[in-house]
């Protein structure tokens, strides 16, 4: 597609429920990133995929968070047993390649997650 | 944790005026990027400046980078109401993929 797309745009769930957030990167981009942005803050890194594998998941806050990218394109961020503190904007980005200077990350519109 | 700082946190100007936002960081970097975010939306990439560059222009945008002071500035000339948004600087260091963002500058351009 023309840009990074994310679905749903908004997700409201109840505490304790399981949610999945989807990201469709720009066609041909091998690198994919997830960030989380709390209100009034800048985005914070969660996880980075190069191809199908998670090359760096050091930003995931705990083991309730998990992400996959089985075919090296679409990625799903999964959150188990959601907590109110998980409420945030979840942003996905992709880049052509992570290597070398000058590689721009293009962001999607985000999924706003609200946990009641 | 966020290691970048934008200054000021908020800026309000009249249409036609110039807006200057500053960014400071704490680590060595490969490049620094500026993004814009309209309320409740995703980030739009504005400009990237590499660590060996000192100044870069794109339309009404001018970015400078001073690696000795670990700082960057974004200048928007002849501002428009449509420039109203939050502006973030971000940078990658040794990993070259993990972007670190500041808290952003909220720019309001009054018509």
Image: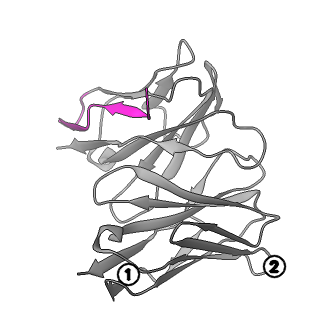
Where A55 sits versus A114, above or below? above
Q: Which residue is drawn at 74% across and 55% down?
A: B93
Q: Give the camera-side residue of B106 and B28.
A: B106
Residue A21 visible in this rendered orientation of the protein: yes
For residue A39, what is the image quadrant? bottom left
Q: CB atoms at circles 1 and 2 under 8 Å apart? A: no
Q: Where is residue B105 shown, x and y percent of the image? A: 43, 74
For disc 1, the marked residue is B10
Crowding around mark 2 (Cα neighbors within 10 Å: few <14, some 14 to 19, many 20+) is few
Magenta stretch, residue numbers = A1-17
Disc 2 is placed on an element classified as: loop
Disc 1 is placed on an element classified as: strand
Where A34 sits versus A79, above or below? below
Residue A61 visible in this rendered orientation of the protein: no
Q: Residue B68 carries which label?
A: 2
Marks counted in the figure total 2
Q: Give the camera-side residue of A90 and B71.
A: B71
Q: Along the polypeptide, which appears first: circle 1 or circle 2?
A: 1
Q: Is residue B107 left or right of residue B103?
A: left
Q: Residue A58 carries which label?
A: none
């Amino acid at each position: 597609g023309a840009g990074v797309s994310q679905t749903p745009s908004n997700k409201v769930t109840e505490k304790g429920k399981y949610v999945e957030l989807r990201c469709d990167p720009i066609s041909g981009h091998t690198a994919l990133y997830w960030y989380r942005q709390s209100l009034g803050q800048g985005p914070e890194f969660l996880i980075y995929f190069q191809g199908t594998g998670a090359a760096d998941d050091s930003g995931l806050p705990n083991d309730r968070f998990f992400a996959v990218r089985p075919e090296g394109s679409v990625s799903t961020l999964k959150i188990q047993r959601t907590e109110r503190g998980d409420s945030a904007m979840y942003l996905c980005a992709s880049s052509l390649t992570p290597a070398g200077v000058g590689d721009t990350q293009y962001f999607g519109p985000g999924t706003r997650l609200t946990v009641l | 944790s966020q290691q970048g700082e934008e200054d000021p946190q908020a800026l309000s100007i009249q249409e036609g005026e110039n807006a200057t936002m500053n960014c400071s960081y704490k680590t060595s970097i490969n490049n620094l990027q500026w993004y814009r975010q309209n309320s409740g939306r995703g980030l739009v990439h504005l400009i990237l400046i590499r660590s060996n560059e000192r100044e870069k222009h794109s339309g009404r945008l001018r970015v400078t980078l001073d690696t000795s002071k670990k700082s960057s500035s974004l200048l928007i000339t002849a501002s428009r109401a449509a420039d109203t948004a939050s502006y973030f600087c971000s940078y990658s260091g040794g990993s070259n993929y993990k972007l670190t963002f500041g808290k952003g500058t909220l720019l309001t351009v009054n018509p």
